[in-house]
Image: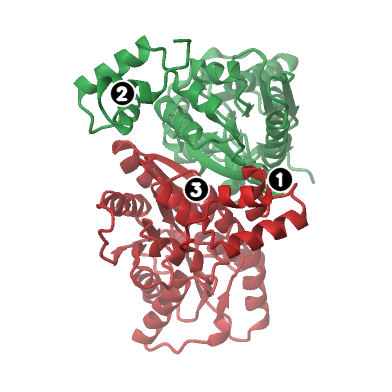
Chain colours: A green, B red
């Protein structure tokens, strides 16, 4: 039997169980005994059963459905990306189904399974903070299954990606703080395994260097969870413990910036006169908080439009025709509000 | 041929076109000529082709996928509901796929089609603001397809629903404003066709009546779109035009409340000393705006948990076994913040 030719029927027949038992056993669903799971998995491995390969080769017609995998639907930036995706998808007769991973690798894996079971024609993916191994994507890409990555670009060769210029956005935000007269700028960084976190950190460091400011490694604070509570705690600790207190904060997202601002205020310091704060990604609430938060706006809607357009191109290619790897980089925009206005123009 | 027995194969064969052409023609997708669409649709009607009936009767095994249809993923309340749904779904070996309707009936219809094409085992639905005719749901329910409605309960008999006590929430919010000393309370209402809007309005009116305050019909302002800009405009107009100005605002959601607060402030009035404001549904930003917004918190997570639990019960019933119609009502909680604190306790 050639690689990938066994079906769940073969497994079910050989073990004398139902198709649904095999399917559920392979997916580790509850309600199936460990003994059965073991037997099914062993035989599947022996027969070189590969679910996705089979599913993909069985596809006869398009489903006109696109699957979108995102970390969190409530994230304002992602919701604008989704709007862009949907706009183009609906105009082209495609439906869009979403799965959120809640930043969990396990949910990312099962979401992809569900999407493939549902015969989506292609995937738009922004992977989870937990994802460090990209095998589940490379497997699909090798089978010529259309995937476009957006915002978070994985370290896989020859992919199609849409991202924003995170380096430039961070550079602009930090330079703005420096130009306003803030000299001791701390950085609340994103999770280390995300390329966007590293690029924003690099932009921050480059801006300091270009203004001949030496960076303080203790003032680069990774915020792996990304909640307001986390950045509140970390910021409070930073300001309470250090001798030379920072007078500026560049946060890798607006939630972290909001938490930092609350921490600074809780210590009796004022924003922006004592401490200037700039966030990243212009959440819906950012203009409404006190003081309104300066931030780096990302073109979410255009990102969605571009990502789905590239995906539709891939889907509409002839079978076996390959696509050209590329990364489209969209520009950000610095939005200056009160939280970073130290210089009052008369 | 009996009702609902024709398949797209019969149509394709008779017209000598491909299955995919028939499928796309029936769904009005682009790329199919109007002539073909007409022919396909006429024959489908003649043969009594009913896509959902067929799709449903062909279902052999469960897909272990639940479809969730919501107006907007960025809506904080809905995102908490989704979390509750996902928690229970994943624990039971189910995946969750989402479609957002953007409050459009057309997208609701095509999302349901996509979900059924994808063979979801059941649907959790919060319908769009545009939906006034519930035929697309009653058709499915007649075929015993499991649907649980949440938050927005449609006017269909014998459904299973999970909602919150909107009347009580609105009553509590309005009573709180009255007890704080605000006597002239306006109401920014939700879209008229949503039951929740009517219940919140009823709660507002009942609270005024119970405190012997006559309501002013001009101060009940429907906000059909639900954006901050809309409520900003309407609130400004209300305060500029009326002789007896309101001193309190109860808004049917926090976005509207935030817009109203900005309008009040733009007119030089102060919140809460001149005007008290209370919203509904405790968005993520509501505690961070200036002043922090009093609001009615809804148990979104529990709503999601309850809705999926009821749906799984329905899915796991034996074929032809019917379910008991019911509406589970969850209680709200009034969250008092600065925006409505007229009485300063010493």
Above or below for A326 versus B42: above
Earlier sequence position, callout 1 versus callout 2? 2
Task: Residue at 69% x, 30% y: name it.
Answer: A173
* Chain of the residue under label 2: A
Q: Is residue B317 above or below residue A294?
A: below
Residue B14 rendering spot, x and y as whole percentages:
64, 52
Tell me the CA gap for discs 1 and 2. 42 Å
Where does label 3 land, which residue? B115
Which quarter of the rendering shows the N terminus of chain A?
Answer: top left
* Local SS, label 3: helix
- The answer to which of B245 and B29 lies nearer the viewer is B29
Q: Position of residue A58 (x, y in %)?
A: 53, 28
Chain letter of mark 1 equals A
Front one among B42 and B334: B42
Q: Is residue A75 visible?
A: no
Q: Residue at x 28, y 54 (%)?
A: B319
Q: Which residue is mark 1?
A: A92
Residue position for label 2: A13
Circle 1 — which element? loop
Q: Output the chain of dot 3.
A: B
- Residue A151 % position (x, y): 62, 29
Q: Residue at x 69, y 28 (%)?
A: A162
Q: Nearer the viewer, mark 1 or mark 2?
A: 2
In front here: B3 or B147?
B3
Residue that lies at the very extreme toward the right in this rendered image: A346
**From where the camera sits, is residue B53 visible?**
yes
């Amino acid at each position: 039997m050639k690689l990938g030719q066994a079906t769940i029927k073969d497994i079910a027949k050989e073990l004398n169980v139902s198709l649904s038992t095999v399917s559920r056993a392979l997916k580790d669903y509850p309600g199936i005994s460990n003994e059965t799971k073991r037997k099914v998995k062993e035989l599947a491995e022996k027969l070189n059963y590969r679910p996705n390969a089979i599913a993909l080769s069985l596809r006869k017609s398009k489903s006109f459905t696109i699957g979108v995998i995102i970390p969190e639907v409530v994230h304002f930036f992602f919701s604008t990306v989704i709007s862009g995706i949907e706009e183009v998808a609906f105009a082209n007769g495609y439906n869009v189904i979403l799965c959120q991973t809640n930043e969990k690798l396990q949910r990312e894996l099962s979401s992809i399974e569900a999407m493939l079971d549902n015969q989506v024609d292609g995937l738009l993916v922004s992977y989870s903070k937990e994802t460090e191994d990209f095998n589940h994507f490379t497997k699909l890409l090798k089978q010529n299954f259309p995937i476009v990555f957006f915002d978070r670009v994985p370290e896989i060769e020859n992919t199609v990606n849409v991202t924003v210029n995170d380096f430039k956005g961070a550079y602009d935000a930090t330079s703005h703080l420096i130009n306003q007269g803030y000299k001791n700028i701390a950085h609340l960084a994103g999770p280390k395994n995300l390329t966007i976190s590293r690029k924003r950190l690099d932009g921050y460091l480059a801006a300091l260097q270009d203004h001949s400011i030496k960076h303080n490694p203790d003032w680069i604070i990774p915020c792996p969870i990304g909640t307001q509570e986390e950045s509140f705690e970390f910021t409070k600790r930073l300001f309470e413990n250090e001798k030379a207190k920072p007078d500026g904060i560049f946060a890798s997202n607006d939630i972290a910036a909001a938490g930092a601002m609350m921490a600074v205020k809780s210590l009796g310091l004022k924003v922006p006169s004592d401490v200037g704060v700039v966030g990243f990604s212009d959440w819906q609430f950012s203009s409404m908080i006190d003081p309104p938060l300066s931030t780096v706006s990302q073109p979410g809607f255009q990102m969605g439009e571009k990502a789905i357009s590239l995906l539709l191109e891939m889907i509409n290619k002839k079978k076996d025709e390959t696509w050209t790897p590329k990364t489209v980089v969209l520009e950000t925009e610095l939005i200056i509000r009160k939280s970073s206005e130290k210089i009052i123009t008369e």
